[in-house]
Amino acid sequence: MAWSVQTPAGRFEVHALVDDQELDSRASTGAIYWEGLCELRSIGADGKSVRVGNGYLEMTGYANALRL
């Protein structure tokens, strides 16, 4: 799984390092969220990617809007 990100500093891809990191907690918190280890890759003009960092990403709100 990967996400593409375009910023003023360039084009990047965030790659999940472990599969199945999405959690469905609609029964308790009402949210579906993704969290886990990831790798950041810079995408050059030639389309080649270079690893530029590692991180931990948490995302919510991508499945549907949360009612608070």
Image: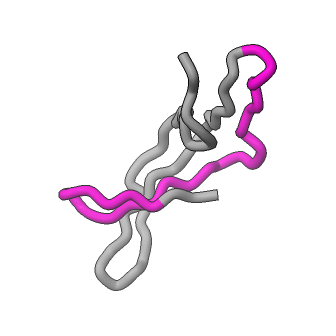
Q: Is residue 60 above or below residue 11?
A: above
> Which residue is found at the position 37% from the left and 70% from the top?
43
Instruction: Please provide the residue range marked out in magenta.
Output: 4-28
- Residue farthest left in this picture: 8
As rendered, which of 58 and 41 lies closer to the eye? 58
Q: Which quadrant is home to the N terminus?
A: bottom right
Specify whether 46 is left or right of 17. left
Q: Which residue is painted at 64% across and 33% down in the image?
A: 33
Q: Quadrant of residue 64?
A: top right
Q: Nearer the viewer, residue 63 or 8?
A: 63
Residue 46 falls within the magenta-colored stretch: no
Tell me the chief SS of the magenta region: strand
User: In which quadrant of the rendered view does residue 4 lie?
Assistant: bottom left
Q: Position of residue 68 (x, y in %)?
A: 54, 16
Q: Is residue 14 magenta?
A: yes
Q: Position of residue 39 (x, y in %)?
A: 51, 50
Which residue is depicted at the point 77% across and 44% down? Answer: 20
Up-down relation of residue 61 to residue 3 (above or below) = above
Position of 6 with respect to 53 (left or right) is left
